[in-house]
Amino acid sequence: MAVSEIFNAFVNDEVRLKWLPAQLTIRKATPSRSVRITWQDGSSVDVYIMSKGESKGTVTIQHGRLASREAADAAREFWAERLDQLAKLLIKATRRS
């Protein structure tokens, strides 16, 4: 999937709700590169998207301002699960095209 598709999955509300059902506010979005989010609990999420070729990309999440180590561990697990769901959604969409 192209980085533009990954970016769209974060900034398009309809697409995002299919894999990330959460209340959030997008503070800044740089097309196909990054998204800065205020999370539902007031913490900060920075999303970095990097191209790995014409139809491949990677996503790095930095979820900051968490209250404790336990919250950070929970966020790590949450994001791993959500990014797996995003990958499945984008692969499914690519196969339909």
Image (cartoon, rainbow, N blue to C red):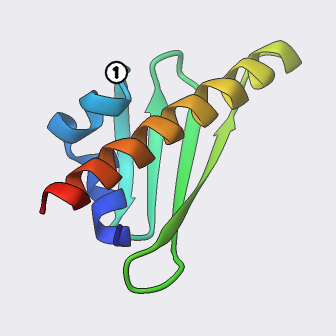
Residue occupied by mark 1? 21
Q: Is residue 64 left or right of residue 59?
A: right
Residue at 47% of width from left, 49% of height from top? Answer: 36
Q: Is residue 11 above or below residue 69?
A: below
Residue at 44% of width from left, 35% of height from top? Answer: 85
Residue at 26% of width from left, 28% of height from top? Answer: 17
Q: Is residue 41 left or right of residue 11?
A: right
Q: Position of residue 68 (x, y in %)?
A: 83, 16
Is 15 in front, or is 94?
A: 94
Tell me the quarter of the image containing the C terminus. bottom left
State which quadrant residue 88 falls in. top left
Q: Is residue 87 left or right of residue 74?
A: left
Q: Is residue 11 above or below residue 44?
A: below
Q: Is residue 4 above or below residue 77?
A: below
Q: Position of residue 80 (x, y in %)?
A: 62, 35
State which quadrant residue 81 falls in. top right
User: Label 1 amino acid?
Assistant: Pro
Q: Is residue 77 left or right of residue 4?
A: right
Tell me the quarter of the image containing the N terminus. bottom left
Q: Position of residue 25 (x, y in %)?
A: 35, 33
Residue at 56% of width from left, 40% of height from top? Answer: 45
Q: Position of residue 11 (x, y in %)?
A: 27, 48
